[in-house]
Amino acid sequence: MNHVFPRTHISIIISIVLIPKGGLDENQLRLLQRQFNRFVKLNLRKESVLKNIHSQHKLTSVLRTQLIAANTLTAVEDLAAPFKRNTSSLADRARDLGLEPLSLLVLSRGLNDSDLRSRARVAQAATQLSVEAVLEKVGHLVAEAVACEIGVRQAVRQLLWASGQLTTALKKTKASVATKNRAGKGGKKSKQKDEKVLTTEQNKFKDYFDWFVILCVCV
């Protein structure tokens, strides 16, 4: 499917809907095109996610309904998150060692600390790892499961937009450190000269050397 709004669609909309109501100007048509493109992109992503989950034999009727009903890319990605697999992730390495059942017990809160350590000692023989290493890898699986929870993702996203901030600062480069060192050896005159060179190179960004903005102000 083409992501660009076809001219035939514009003509049909204009002739059926817009002309009787007085038509739309160029800006309104451009907005309509963007909305259509967004709709196409959303549905293409839904199709891709559905195929991916179906190929894993994990697509349930409930999940299919949720994906079809999702009206934003963010909602689609939240639903798809548990089914994304990165073979280089720490959680996948722990999964390959057969530690996922133990992580599921932890998530179900069916183990106290002593029970968890007892089971970790059992897993120690199979994985050739120390008890602490087993517990660490189980933690990777638990962290992945929590991160894939839609409620957690939404809560973190809301917290980020409510209290997060975007900050910029002047980065100390090797050149600036070397300049500072030379300035220290060369005395006041050398220091002033070196600082002048740095200021000239970075002058156009000086307003952002120590700058921040609250994210909620940006939306």
Image (cartoon, rainbow, N blue to C red):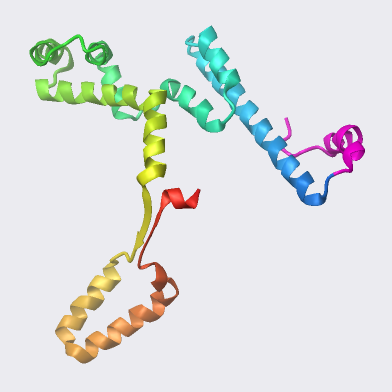
Q: Residue at x 41, y 21 (%)?
A: 82
Of 91 and 111, the residue lying toward us: 111
| Residue 28: x %, y % from top left | 77, 46
Of 70 and 161, the residue lying toward us: 161
Image quarter in which the N terminus is found: top right
Of 10 and 6, the residue lying toward us: 10
| Residue 112: x %, y % from top left | 12, 13
Of 136 and 217, the residue lying toward us: 217
Q: Residue at x 53, y 26 (%)?
A: 76
Would you say the magenta stretch is mainly helix, strand or loop?
A: helix
| Residue 120: x %, y % from top left | 13, 15
Q: Is residue 89 above or below residue 170?
A: above
Q: For residue 130, say whether it is visible.
A: no
Q: Is residue 144 magenta?
A: no
Q: Residue at x 79, y 45 (%)?
A: 29
**Seen from this angle, which residue lies furthest bottom?**
189
Q: Is residue 9 magenta?
A: yes
Q: For residue 177, say whether it is visible.
A: yes
Q: Residue at x 20, y 82 (%)?
A: 183
Residue 118 found in image quarter: top left
Q: Is residue 127 above or below residue 198?
A: above
Residue 39 found in image quarter: top right
Identify the magenta region.
1-23
